[in-house]
Image: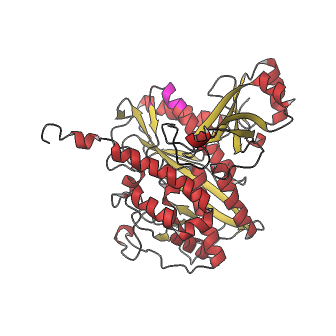
Amino acid sequence: MTGRIDLEALKEPMRRGGIRTVMAAIPDMRGHLKGKRLNSLALLERLGDFGGNRVAEACAYILATNADMDPLSGFDLTSWSDGFQDMGVDADWRSLRMLPYMSSLALVHCDAVDLDGTPIEVAPRQILRRQLERLAGLGYQVKIGLESEFVLYNGPEPAVGRNIDYDFDLPPQTATFLGHLETVLPDAGVPIEAVKPEGAPGQFEVTFPYTSASPLEACDNYTVYRHALRHTAQQHGMTASFMAAPETGVGSGLHLHLSLWRDDRAAFATASHRDMPTEAMGHSIAGLMGAMPHLAPFFAPTTNAYKRYASRHSFAPYFMSWGPDNRGCAIRVTGHGQGTHLEVRLGGADANPYLLTAAALASIAHGLSKKLTLPPPCLGDAYADRSSLPLPRDLTEALRDFQTSALAHDLFGTPLVVHYSRAAQAEVDEQQRTVTDVERRHLATA
């Protein structure tokens, strides 16, 4: 049994012991899967042959913590002031799938809810749902495809020690790992479009096709991809890193390809990406240009993420610009005909796909509803484009803008802005009190 699986088809293997464990997983604020491994027979008994969605309860701090899972104060959702209470874990059975790279195990994505069943609004899946509903209210459906970069390490060093961009001549261990990954992902219900080496040592890119299903499914698939990639790399004695800047001068991104559709017609369709954008695309780009700079903690959530923006001519954006088929821009128009779409190049590899997508969709909805005017495109070197605003240079600057932006509060609501501001502030605080290797270079001369 591989890939997505119907709930009814899973019952008998669970009864017979072929499936012994079901991972009930909630994507956390960083887009990592957190939850419980549920015994399949106990789960069957509890639900009465799946008579409901509540599969577990878990401490709500899953959605109110830092990367090290330290219990923090200052969150309204849960903290020491209320003793870190539980929340409900409700299975989305449509997401049920086998994980063939782990023995006798299935996975279901779950939603975080209050114990009375009310959705928890700061949960990433719920945040994305709300923005999809907003665009649906404007008459649009969304298609997305994600493009992920990571660096593969063999011990402390990159698995390949040189630029191998588009190269087929890979070390045997690395080639074997990639072949294994290309088998594992489809078997786990994660369709892939292409895998290629990238420009930095040990860096690779995996692209995922547009899906006619909900962007929620695409983001669910992405969380499984990250889990499968790490697991598979460890099986080969290697480590996969999703840091946005894993080495000085190296940047890994999570690029978001998206298009809008209305009545099964592509709202961005043009004969060529170099044609003038359609009205819908023009308003969408204007919305992205106007709103995304205020939402940086949603696509660059760590202090490390801003080091990806630090170098010019790095293929990471430096200014908030847009242009036709220009990889130096923050927003790239690409494709042709029905496939004309936008590539949002702002996200670092450490971005949460649900939050990155939600930020882009909220920005697009803002541009469409306000009929914002499209600024001029960048037609040359995007790193020399002085007419566009620079991106935030660190998380402190981005957080200050996010907290005080009336637009951020309008698009996502004050409680959500406050919640994610607390998470970003915890990240800043930790970095400010941590002594770095750069500082320790001066131990003998200080």
Q: Is residue 237 magenta?
A: yes
Q: Is residue 246 magenta?
A: no
Q: Is residue 193 visible?
A: yes
Return the x and y of residue 363 as percentages of the image width and height.
59, 67
Residue bounds of the magenta highlight: 231-238
**In front here: 277 or 55?**
55
395 above or below 283? Answer: above
Q: Quadrant of the N terminus?
A: top right
348 above or below 191? Answer: below
Q: Quadrant of residue 326?
A: bottom left
280 above or below 192? Answer: below
Point out the residue furthest to the left here. Answer: 445
Colour scheme employed for the rendering of this structure:
secondary structure
Circle count: 0
269 above or below 203? Answer: below
**In front here: 347 or 81?**
81
Return the x and y of residue 124 as percentages of the image width and height.
62, 50
Q: Quadrant of residue 52?
A: top right
Return the x and y of residue 234 as percentages of the image width and height.
49, 27
Residue at 81 percent across and 35 percent down: it is 7
Residue at 12 percent across and 41 percent down: it is 445
Q: In the picture provided, is 368 more to the left or to the right than 343? A: right
**In front here: 155 or 50?**
50
Point out the residue furthest to the front here. Answer: 81
Q: Is residue 331 visible?
A: no
Magenta residues, dominant SS class = helix
Q: Quadrant of the C terminus?
A: top left
Residue at 40 percent across and 61 percent down: it is 397
Return the x and y of residue 182 as percentages of the image width and height.
58, 37
Point out the residue furthest to the top here. Answer: 16
Residue at 50 percent across and 70 percent down: it is 324
